[in-house]
Amino acid sequence: MSIELSRRLILTGAAGATLAGATRAVAAKKEEAFPPEALHLDHALLGPDDGIALLARNENPYGPSESALRMVEYAGKKGAYYPGQANITLAEMIAERHGVDPKQIVITTGSGEALSAIAVLYGPKGPIVAPRLFWDTTALYAARLGMAEIQRVPLTEDMGVDLAGIEAAVTGGTGLVQLCNPNNPTGLVSDSKTFKAAVKRMAAKTTVLVDEAYMELADDPDGNTCIDLIKKGDDVIVSRTFSKIYGMAGLRVGYTISSEETAEKIRGTAMSWIAGTGLAAAIGAYNDHAFLDFSKSKIIEARQTIMDKTASLGMETLPSQTNFVYFKSGKPANEVQKVMENEKIIVRGQYMDYTDWTRVSMGKLEDVERFCNFLPEAAGV
Ligand SMILES: Cc1ncc(COP(=O)(O)O)c(C=O)c1O
C-alpha cells in the first residue's frame, strides 16, 4: 500500500475499518482451525464418540455444572500463572464445610493422586489390608513399584466388606487398612455404626484410609462418613473427589482430610501441581447445591431404571448407593462386555474371579435405557 493511500485511508477512517476486517478474518481463520476439528481425528478428542453409550468408568455426564464451566473459562485466561492461591481457597471451602482446619486438607490431581501417594507412604511399612474387591488401582501402583503388598480379605457371603475379617487381619505390622465406602465395584455401603466402630478400633493400631469417592451419592452421607473420626483424633484419612457427583472427572480434582501431620506427609509425597482450571472449577461448583441435587436425582433415576430391569430379569443385583450397579447376569462378564460393545454400549468386564458379575455405570438416561433394552439379548435371557 502506498504512503499516499495509507494517509487517505487514515484520514477517512477506512484504515480502522480495514484493520477490523483483517482482525475478523484472522479470528475466523483461527476458529476454522480450532481443534478438535482441525486435528481431523476419527474419534472424539475428549469424552465418548457420538453414538457410544459409555457406561464403564463411573463418570457423571451431567457435569460439569455451569458454575464450574464459568470458572474454567476464567482459569484458562489466567493459565500463565501457577495457581497457588486457588488451592488455598478450595482447601478453606472444604475445611469450612467439614469443620476442620484447612491444613488438614490436601488437594490433588484427582483423588487418585492422593491415594497413590498414601499407598507409597504406608506400603513400605507393611501390607495394605483391604477387602478382596475394592478400588485397588492405587495400591497396585505402589505394588508395581515394589513398595506395597496387598492383603485381600474375602467378602462376606452377601458381597459386603467383612469388617470382622479385616480387623482380625490387622496387626502391629500392618502398613495401612484401605476401605472404600461405598465400595467399588459392589456399590454397597457398610452399616454405619459397625463400620465406624471397626475403623476406630483399627485406627488405634494402624492408619485407616477410607475412600469416600461416592459418598455424596449415598442415602446418608453425613451419617456414613468417617470424617467425624478424624475430628476426634483417630488415625483416619478420608479421600473424596470431584470426579463423581460433581461430574468433573476430566478436570482432575480430589482431596484428602486427615490430621495436619498426615496431611503434611501426603502433600510431600504427591507428585504434581494441580491445574488452575480444575481448582477454579471445583471452587465454582463446590457449594452449587442446586446442581448437586440435580446430579444426584438423575443418577438415582438411572440407577432405579437399571435395578428395575435387572430385577425383572431375575438377576441378583446389589443395592447400589453409587453411580454404578453390580449385578449377576449369569453370563461371563467379558462376554457381556463384548456383545454390548458391538452395540456401542461400553460396560466393565470381569473383576478377579467374579466371572458373571457385570458393573454398569450411570450415564445419561437415554444411554441407560439402551443398555436396559439390550441386556436380555446380551445376557441371553
Ligand atoms: C473408589 C474410587 N476412588 C477413587 C477413584 C479415583 O478417582 P479420581 O482420581 O478421578 O478422583 C475412583 C475412580 O473411579 C474410584 O472408583
Image (spheres, rainbow, N blue to C red):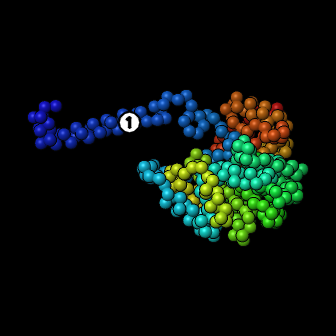
Q: Quadrant of the N terminus?
A: top left
Q: Amino acid at mark 1?
A: Lys
Question: Which residue lies at the image location 22% right of the left edge and 38% below the top edge?
Answer: 18
Mark 1 Cβ and ligand 1 under 8 Å apart = no
Q: In the image, is residue 265 above or below residue 334?
A: below
Answer few, some or many: residues within 10 Å of disc 1's Cα (few below 14, many 20 plus, some between 14 and 19). few
In percent of width and height, residue 20 lies at: 26, 41
Question: Which residue lies at the image location 61% right of the left edge and 56% below the top edge?
Answer: 268
Q: Work out which residue is located at the far right of the displayed protein and give it.
A: 157
Q: In the image, is residue 196 above or below residue 43?
A: below
Question: Which residue lies at the image location 81% right of the left edge and 40% below the top edge?
Answer: 352
In percent of width and height, residue 145 lies at: 70, 43
Q: Which residue is mark 1?
A: 30
Q: Work out which residue is located at the far left of the displayed protein and give it.
A: 4
Q: Quadrant of the C terminus?
A: top right
Specify the quadrant of the image occupied by residue 230: bottom right
Secondary structure at numbered mark 1: helix
In percent of width and height, residue 40 lies at: 49, 28
- Front residue of this view, candidates 265 and 203: 265
